[in-house]
Image: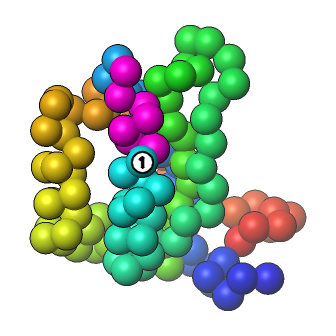
Amino acid sequence: MNNAYADSSRVFELRTYHCAPGKLDALLTRFRDHTMRIFERHGMHNAGYFLPADEPAKGNTLVYIISHASREKADQNWKEFTADPEWQNVKAASEGNGKLVEKIDREYMTAADFSPLK
């Protein structure tokens, strides 16, 4: 098992990004080329990325799960991530033609005792 998931204080964060019309491909490129790597640098472990298969979310939504060492670390990780100069440059460059995301939903979760991913 991946050591990143061994700590019982670990929290998972489920995030749903509702994209601006026509911006999903640009968002996926940003995640693929930059965001995932920057997340890891700030203690945010990439667990999975998903695209809804059914309407109305199909074609305009990204759903993903990342994990943090604890809820307190999650807050710290996000503060450090948003202040990261590389992230700020990547975000600005990718949004040159308008914002990519209109709305973000998020939920913090802990693993059930029987979950294979902890």
| Residue at the image point whose x is 42% and y is 54% from the top | 31
In the displayed structure image, the side of residue 16 where residue 98 appears, left or right: left
Relative to 37, residue 101 above or below:
above
Instruction: Tell me if mark 1 has few (under 14), some (14-19) or many (20+) residues whose alpha carbon lies within 10 angstroms of its own.
Output: few
Tell me if residue 103 can be seen: no
Query: In the rendered image, which quarter is residue 98 located in?
Result: top left
| Residue at the image point whose x is 47% and y is 24% from the top | 60
Percent coordinates x, y for residue 53 in the rendering: 69, 24
Three-letter amino acid code at disc 1?
Thr
Magenta-colored span: 22-28
Percent coordinates x, y for residue 24 in the rendering: 42, 31
| Residue at the image point whose x is 81% and y is 63% from the top | 115
24 magenta-colored: yes
In the displayed structure image, the side of residue 31 where residue 20 appears, left or right: left
Relative to 69, residue 13 above or below:
above
Percent coordinates x, y for residue 59 in the rendering: 53, 22
Residue to which mark 1 is pinned: 29
Query: In the rendered image, which quarter is residue 11 located in?
Result: bottom right
Tell me if residue 66 can be seen: yes
Q: Quadrant of the N terminus?
A: bottom right
Residue lying furthest top:
56
Relative to 58, residue 10 above or below:
below
Q: Is mark 1 on a helix, strand or loop?
A: helix
User: Would you say the magenta stretch is mainly helix, strand or loop?
Assistant: helix
Percent coordinates x, y for residue 74 in the rendering: 38, 68
Q: Quadrant of the C terminus?
A: bottom right
| Residue at the image point whose x is 59% and y is 50% from the top | 49
